[in-house]
Amino acid sequence: MAAGSCANNLTFTNSCGQSFPVNPGINTALNGVVHKYIYPVDFDSKNSELLISLMSVLDDAELNGFREMSSKFRQNVISADTFYLHCLEIMGDNLPNIFPGLIAQLPDIQKQQVQFQLLQINE
């Protein structure tokens, strides 16, 4: 398989219109360039919307637990699976409505790909 090719042929398109293969471990285009996350212009407003959504379904203890687990995931202290399962546990039926926004705001393309794949597998 060529560098940057995607066995599942799925791609993720970010808010800037850039497409990336949805395949954990691959974050390069066909030309071998490693992609860097670019914060969208509306990042702060999307982050505020996401926080409002989280606050509407989580109590204070769950929200604090989410923040802690999110931080641990971003710092590679916990696995993508552990983070996803925690989100599923606290968000329940609201996960499909909130989790895509979490993925989009995650400033790490490889972590986005893994979380997107977990969401797709578990739908």
Image: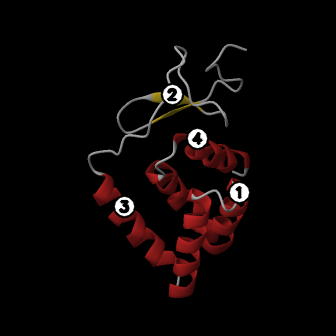
Mark 4 or mark 3, which is nearer to you?
4
What residue is at 73 percent from the left and 46 percent from the top?
Answer: 121
Query: What is the secondary structure assignment of the residue under circle 4?
Result: helix
Query: What is the secondary structure assignment of the residue under circle 3?
Result: helix
Quick check: marks 2 and 4 in contact, CB under 8 Å? no
Q: Earlier in the sequence, mark 2 or mark 3?
A: 2
Q: Earlier in the sequence, mark 2 or mark 1?
A: 2
Mark 3, residue position: 47
Q: Position of residue 39 (x, y in %)?
A: 35, 45
Q: Earlier in the sequence, mark 4 or mark 1?
A: 1
What residue is at 34 percent from the left and 57 percent from the top?
Answer: 46
Q: Say whether residue 14 is left or right of residue 117.
A: left
* Front residue of this view, candidates 78 and 17: 78
Q: Earlier in the sequence, mark 3 or mark 1?
A: 3
The alpha-carbon separation of the residues under discs 2 and 1 comes to: 22 Å
Query: What is the secondary structure assignment of the residue under circle 2?
Result: loop
Query: What is the secondary structure assignment of the residue under circle 1?
Result: loop
Mark 2 or mark 3, which is nearer to you?
2
Mark 2, residue position: 34
The alpha-carbon separation of the residues under discs 2 and 3 comes to: 25 Å
Mark 4, residue position: 110
What residue is at 44 percent from the left and 36 percent from the top?
Answer: 36
Q: Position of residue 49 (x, y in %)?
A: 35, 64
